[in-house]
Amino acid sequence: MFIQIPGMIDPHTHLRDLDWSHKATFASETAAAVAGGYWAIFDMPNTPPSTTSRPALDRKLAALRSQAVCDWGVYFGASQADNTNQYADAAGDVCGLKIFNNATTGDLLIEDQAERKRHYAAWPSSKIIAVHAEEETVLDILALVRRFRRRTHFLHISTAREIAYLRAAKDEGLPITIGVCPHHLYLTQDDAHALGSLGLMKPGLKTAADRDALWEAVASGLVDVIESDHAPHTLAEKQSEKPPYGVPGLETTLPLLLLAVREGRLSLERVVQLVAENPRRIWSLPCLPDTYTLVDLDAGFTIERGQLHTACGWSPFEGMRVYGKVRETWIRGSKVFDGEQVLVPPGFGRNVFGEAA
């Protein structure tokens, strides 16, 4: 059985390139995106040089324009060194503002609530704020949402407690949305020993009870988006004495969700909402004509590193049997992926915000 999924979007990726081009490039990771079925993906600001100034933003936009094979957006980053005076100029060319409120890769951590308040007050209300907030920090961010009424997307939620906080916030009517990652749905602390450093990510793997709470929230409609938090590192780096946090996920997100459909965890309609309809609604993007993914629902396959397009060439889900093979990805009337290889040249992709929107 074949289905078409219109305009898939992953709003949470770390594509690397720039000063980290040894890990991956915009060309390699947007190739992974179209292989995973995505029309557009949004890149986070914490690859050095951090996207916290106009020159850094312009450098990233130029690099993406020359390399990307899918459509894309980028986040501007809230900086410890107050950069709020640049927000009005940057907002038009980006998909939103990212605020890192708990420990993560890079140097953009903002732990002081007064500093967070300054960023919330300064960011234009026309664009969303995306936050890394864990456990009690979720309550701190909700206090700012309550005060400033800024649309806020909570990224990679991973615990039952966070889900409870956000369920109450939605019941209150706060303008929030929720993202969850496949690795927190399929992996737990019990898998950590077998995975070793390949299971290291931020937020980390949680308990089976947390995982079950996430599945319930996804199935019930509380969670809005399944996002990959795609964060490639070289295998050598992950196997080093100080392995970095982060795992790839652009090519495994859709088949993992379609496995959940096969297992009766989710409906197919719910999957389409999570990877396509809801991200487009949240970021106010209409689906472009002739932009869709053709998926063979009955095609089962085992995730193998040799089949991946991501430059890092590994996956924490290696060896897992999944279902739902991407046979074609179409963007703006062009077939960009034929189930095996990318068919368009670097630079085909467009910024869906601002400059080329």
Image (cartoon, rainbow, N blue to C red):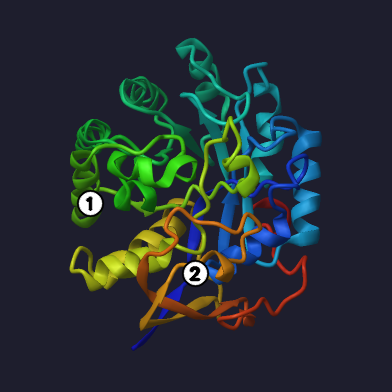
Residue under label 1 = 215
Badge 1 crowding class, 10 Å Cα cut-off, few under 14, some 14 to 19, many 20 or more, is some
Q: Residue 299: which quarter of the image?
A: bottom left
- Distance CA(mark 2)–CA(mark 1): 24 Å
Q: Residues within 10 Å of mark 2 (few under 14, many from 20)?
A: many
- In this picture, is 355 found above or below 199? below
Q: State the residue at coordinates (50%, 60%).
A: 9
Residue 203 position, x and y percent, is 41, 34
The label nearer to you, 2 versus 1, is 1
The vertical placement of 73 against 155, above or below, is below
Q: Is residue 276 visible?
A: no
* Quadrant occupied by the C terminus: bottom right
- Callout 2 amino acid: Gly
* Mark 2, residue position: 7
Left or right relative to 37: residue 265: left
Can you say whether 288 is above or below 128 in the image? below
At numbered mark 1, what does the secondary structure look like: helix, strand or loop?
A: helix
Q: Say the numbered circle drawn on residue 170.
A: none
* Residue 207 locus on image (x, y percent): 24, 37
**Mark sitting earlier along the chain (2/1):** 2
Q: Secondary structure at mark 2?
A: loop
Q: Amino acid at mark 1?
A: Trp
- Residue at 71% x, 55% y: name it: 26
Q: Residue at x 50, y 56 (%)?
A: 315
Q: Please name the residue shown 42% across and 46% down the image.
A: 195
Above or below: residue 147 compared with residue 334: above
Any part of residue 333 in sight? yes
Residue 97 appears in which quarter of the rendering?
A: top right
In the figure, is residue 22 to the left or right of 37? Answer: right
